[in-house]
Amino acid sequence: MKLLVLRGWLLLLYFDTILRVCDFRRLHAVVQEEPMSPCCRDNVPPVKFLCRAMDFACVFYFKQVLCLQRSAATTVLLRRYGVPAEMVIGAQLLPFKSHAWVEVEEIPVNDKPYMREIYQVLERC
């Protein structure tokens, strides 16, 4: 678990740096281009376990982690373990809000299960 938390923490740092130095387009491209690792399914931790490790990484991160950074890092972490994860970005019109979360087989895994009822999906990557 410690190694997974460390990997999650490093991904948070990586995406934090991308958002500081580059922009959203670069973050989107990095997530979109991350291949799904061809792992053997016997050795892969459960999705819930990987998401919990990312939650711990967010707790230990040195500043507040926003949903875009967290979702990008979670998506990449899951893909590196062979999970077909997608980062989803959605918006609500009134009052305007935007949010990002991660889905596996169109089921939210790092947020509430009713996210698509609240937010209109704008992008998947």
Image (spheres, rainbow, N blue to C red):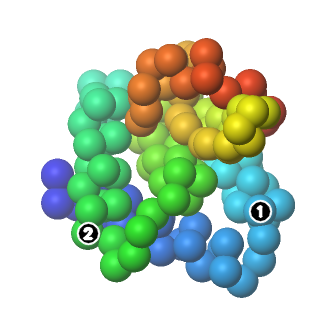
Could one spot residue 7 in this view of the protein? Answer: no
Relative image position of residue 10 (x, y in whole percent): 41, 70
In the rendered picture of this protein, how many numbered marks are placed on residues? 2
Relative image position of residue 1 (x, y in whole percent): 17, 52
Amino acid type of the residue that numbered disc 2 sits on in the rendered structure: Phe
Residue 16 quadrant: bottom right
Judge left or right: residue 122 versus residue 115.
right
Mark number displayed over residue 60: 2
Residue 84 quadrant: top right
Name the residue at 34% across, 51% down: 54
Mark number displayed over residue 24: 1
Name the residue at 34% across, 30% down: 47
Against 115, residue 96 (above or below) is: below
User: For the residue carrying disc 1, how many other residues have a C-alpha within 10 Å: few (<14), some (14-19), or many (20+)?
Assistant: few
Against 100, residue 106 (above or below) is: above
Relative image position of residue 73 (x, y in whole percent): 50, 55
